[in-house]
Amino acid sequence: MKIIGTGRSHPSLVVTNEMLTHILDTSDEWITSRTGIKERRVISSENLEDLAIDAAKKALADANMDAKDLDYIICANVVNEFVSPAMSCIIQGAIGATCPCFDLNGACVGFIYALEIAESFYRSGKYKNILIVCAEEPSRMVNWHDRTASVLFGDGAGAVVLTEGDNIKATKMSASCNWDRLYQKHELQYSPYNSKPNSNLPLVMHGQDVFMFATKAAIRDISNVLKQSGIKPDEVDHFLIHQANLRIIKSIKDFLRQPEEKFPLNIHRYGNTSSASVPILLDEVNKEGKLKRGDLIVLSAFGAGFVSGACILEW
Ligand code: ACO
């Protein structure tokens, strides 16, 4: 397949590091030096589905495609206000599409999982035009009294439209179960026959373990897609890495011995927006006119599971 349109949408509220010092024992200096984050967008008056629909409409407009011409919609999402139906159904109705759709929970790697699935759908010969929307609201997952996790995340949505083409050169998906390092349990009601208590359970994160996993996994997956495609790091024009921590991105850059200019960043403005991170960054570089036809782009992400994935595509 090939990407022919991109879009993104952000909540209007900007929460700066300074604002967080009023509710948490933290500082701009600590957050900036440990993570690279200066501010993030947090949902206040909007709904996550509004952002998802807005990003989808922008990607369709950019692709110059009518929603009726879509053959499939995949939405990557970890949590939203609906247990059912899937967020993709809400998007499908709002944009006026008539195609089937489903959600996938690939944590922060949802976009790359969705790309690989879209490519497989296309290769099956049944589907040609596919919309991927990644919409995430980690601000509903974290405990806002826990400074170790709440400062890292932000909300947002990113979307792409794909059609037939031969531009996805290689993909590599991985999973290694270490779920207890980064997880959140549902707040669901137990039946009267179950002795477990009902409770609100926020995100649990063992930051240093996640950091070590993320660095190793990204380097391994990127090396894999480069090897599969026979492309050398020097030939890649842009490395779009999941914006979770500036120090993780720097470690990957140092390993690949590539210049800073090849690693576009927006972590300072948005923090970690989970699966929306890579498509939001892709839309930014696209709309800024930084992508030329034929450019080689590596995408890489990692997240809870642990799961990770990389992809190399031609623009
Ligand atoms: N403000 C001030 N101090 C803090 C804060 C904060 N927000 N958070 C932690 N600290 C303190 C700790 O309590 C600790 O204090 P102590 O030494 O008195 O015990 C000290 O800072 C150092 O804490 P560490 O955890 O050792 O700090 P570290 O350098 O490892 O950075 C961080 C922590 C930023 C969380 C880092 O481990 C990290 O980024 N890990 C990856 C997390 C991540 O990316 N998660 C999501 C990825 S997967 C996905 O996207 C779903």
Image: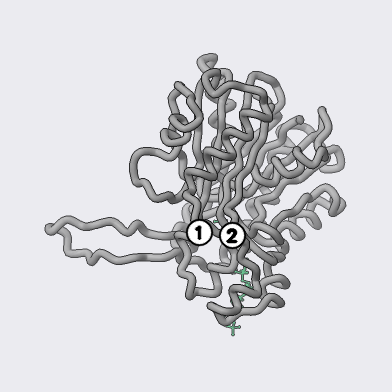
Farthest residue, direction front:
45
Is residue 212 in view? no
Q: Which residue is outermost to the left?
A: 193
| Residue 141 visible in this rendered orientation of the protein | yes
Label 1 beta carbon within 8 A of ligand 1:
no
Asked whether disc 1 touches disc 2, contact meaning CB atoms under 8 Å apart, the reply is yes
Q: Position of residue 198 (x, y in %)?
A: 25, 64
Quarter-wise, where is residue 133 in the image?
top right
Q: Which residue is mark 2?
A: 13
SS for dot 2: loop
- Secondary element type, mark 1: loop
Q: CA distance from mark 1 to mark 2?
A: 7 Å
What amino acid type is highlighted by mark number 1? Answer: Ser
Number of other residues with Cα within 10 Å of mark 1, as a class: few under 14, some 14 to 19, many 20 or more: few
Residue type at mark 2: give it: Leu
Q: Residue at position x 73%, y 44% from top?
A: 284
In the picture, the quarter occupied by the N terminus is top right
Task: Identify whether 296 is placed above or below 259.
Answer: above
When asked about the image quadrant of residue 34, the answer is: bottom right
Q: Is residue 2 left or right of residue 204?
A: right
Name the N-terminal-most of marks 1 and 2.
2
Residue underneath mark 1 = 44
Residue 312 % position (x, y):
71, 36
Q: Residue at x 63, y 52 (%)?
A: 217
For the point 59% across and 55% down, the residue is 12
Q: Mark 2 Cα within 10 Å, few/some/many (few <14, many 20+)? A: few
Tag shown at residue 60: none
